[in-house]
Amino acid sequence: MPDVVKLYIETGTFSGTLDVQEQIRLDYEEDVRKYAEGLNQTKIISVYRSVPAQLAKENKKFQFNKISKNARSREYTGCIEWLIDAGVITECNCLQYPELPLKGNIEESKYKLYYPDTGLLVSALDEEAQEDLRVNKNLGVYKGALYENFVAEAFVKQGLGLFYYKKENSTLEEDFFVRTQNNLIPVEVK
């Protein structure tokens, strides 16, 4: 049983659960330092830490310049792949067109990143946002990020791939697509 769930069952409250989640995130970062041989561990951790802020933006496409002013994709691609392979983040691929087939229709340079556990995303938010969430039930700028992350988490747990569509220079956008046998179903998260 996950430690956070166990703590909740034992105490009947959420008190202390953020501390457990924070420790899990710190353990992930420690694992990077132990196991990410041959890669820039600092950059891997920077990518991991940037996901919440990236999701809070209106344009949730992962942007390297949000990690560091002069960051370039070639410097971070291996870091992202390492985090995906480790199961610490989940990738949502951008489609060139909102149509089948999905895998042959991906724009390689455009994607969103999510945490595979929305509770860990909440624990990664700044203290002010966490306080607003707990006390005021105010999700603020993180509302869309939390909802999208929750849906992404649910889709991945159902074995579904993550795909989205965003037309350049347009407001035409769809948060997710789910494939049935012969159809593509758009999913808008509000």
Image (spheres, rainbow, N blue to C red):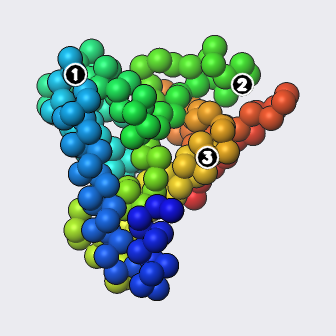
Where residue 37 is drawn, which disc sits there? 1
- Residue named by callout 2: 99
- Amino acid type, mark 3: Lys
Q: Residue at x 42, y 28 (%)?
A: 85
- Amino acid type, mark 2: Glu
**Along the line of sight, which residue is nearer the eye, 114 or 166?**
114
Q: CA distance from mark 3 to mark 1?
A: 29 Å
Q: Earlier in the sequence, mark 3 or mark 1?
A: 1
Q: Position of residue 125 (x, y in %)?
A: 29, 60
Quadrant that contains the C terminus: bottom right
- Residue named by callout 3: 157
Asked where in the image residue 174 lies, by quadrant, the reply is top right
In this view, 58 is above or below 127: above
In this view, 165 is above or below 75: below
Quick one: label 2, few (<14), some, or many (20+) residues within 10 Å?
some
- Say what secondary structure mark 1 lies in: loop
- Say what secondary structure mark 2 lies in: loop
Q: Residue at x 41, y 64 (%)?
A: 3
Quick one: label 1, few (<14), some, or many (20+) residues within 10 Å?
few
Asked where in the image residue 48 lies, by quadrant, the reply is top left
Q: In the picture provided, is 69 more to the left or to the right than 21?
A: left
Q: Position of residue 139 (x, y in %)?
A: 40, 69
Q: Earlier in the sequence, mark 2 or mark 1?
A: 1
Q: Position of residue 7 (x, y in %)?
A: 41, 74
In this view, 96 is above or below 140: above
